[in-house]
Amino acid sequence: MSVLIEGLPDAVALRCLAHVPFYLHPKLELVSHTWRAAVRGHELYKAREEVGSSEEFLCVCAFEPDNLWQLYDPLDDIWITLPVLPSQIRHLAHFGTVSTAGKLFVLGGGSEAVDPLTGDQDGSFATNEVWSYDPVLRKWAQCAPMPVARAMFACCVLDGKIIVAGGFTSCRKSIAQAEMYDPNKDVWVSVPDLPYTHNSACTGVVIGGKMHVVHKGFSMVQVLEKPSDGWLVEDHSWLQGPMAVVKGFLYIMSHGLIYKQESGKRKVVVSASEVKKRIGSAMIGLGEEIYVVGGVIGPDRCNRDIKPMSDVDVLTVGRERPIWRRVTPMPWCRGTILGCTLMNI
């Protein structure tokens, strides 16, 4: 029987391999069949957690090219391209995306893409598809579908479970239904409905261990801490705009500025002049930083063209004087960001 490293028990050898950065794992597989089996096994990733070498990646899907996800490694400033999401729906959009149980999940959504040859619409506005990407096996798998097809809905993770709420059906009807998914059992169960529905898209954000459902254009926020307790309705009067959570605090980009929401008050953190012209970009917190990814610029009075962006601007907020910097742009994805989340590997 082959051993990973001559003279070492495999348990010790795994802990040695656990310190190798994730982006180098494909090269580890070339050493031997034994190493390949180890890299493609979940024991190595348990060892990474034990030795504290787990890495957090930014997961991004943009409009171009369709259904392609990329991972950004902030430590090495590099991008990793994933296999194309195998959904039959072209330009899947308006979906929910989260990461839990060591996997990336893409839920629901739909597309209004039209086949350029036939003129037929490729899919419906909302579906109940659920896909997961396993970074260990490096492949996508289809999971149990959501009980209700939906698009433009709130999607978050609480205690390792995925909560979906609100949104629109394939008939573009707003709904209050909410469900919870257990990734270990691949099972959906119902949770209490939202108290209110609105005829606008909603998003979900987790602050202080609670899921907050925010509807565009409304100050009322619906909050869930424990599914068994149901939802509370609170008036936070948050500004409208892209949101990100950093170290438990909510940051909002609005009117060309970044605000920090704290104890019912908000204060200006820094100007967002670097990114305010971009439409359809994603904003997300990673570590002590805010990442603004992709988007499009234009048209305006001077230029009627629409310019898809692949740029990534980073704001470091965990210091006395926040500063902007630019990191390596996305190699393939550009334009409107359709999905953005974090994944720990």
Image: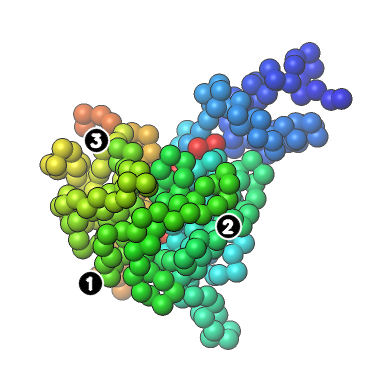
Residue 337 can be seen in this image:
no
Q: From the image, state whether disc 1 or disc 2 is nearer to you.
A: 2
Q: Which residue is mark 3?
A: 322
Kind of residue sitting beneath label 1: Arg
Q: Is residue 166 left or right of residue 330?
A: left
Q: Which residue is mark 2?
A: 144
User: Which residue is nearer to you in this view: 167 or 242?
Assistant: 167
Q: Residue at x 41, y 77 (%)?
A: 171
Mark 1–mark 2 CB contact (< 8 Å): no
Is disc 2 placed on a helix, strand or loop? loop
Quarter of the figure with the C terminus? top right
Is disc 1 placed on a helix, strand or loop? loop
Q: Is residue 224 left or right of residue 161?
A: left
Kind of residue sitting beneath label 2: Ala
Residue 87 image offset from top left, x and y in percent: 59, 64
User: Which residue is nearer to you in this view: 248 or 323?
Assistant: 248
Q: Which residue is mark 1?
A: 301
Q: Residue at x 87, y 25 (%)?
A: 1
Q: CA distance from mark 3 to mark 2?
A: 43 Å
Q: Residues within 10 Å of mark 3 (few under 14, many from 20)?
A: few
Q: Residues within 10 Å of mark 2 (few under 14, many from 20)?
A: some
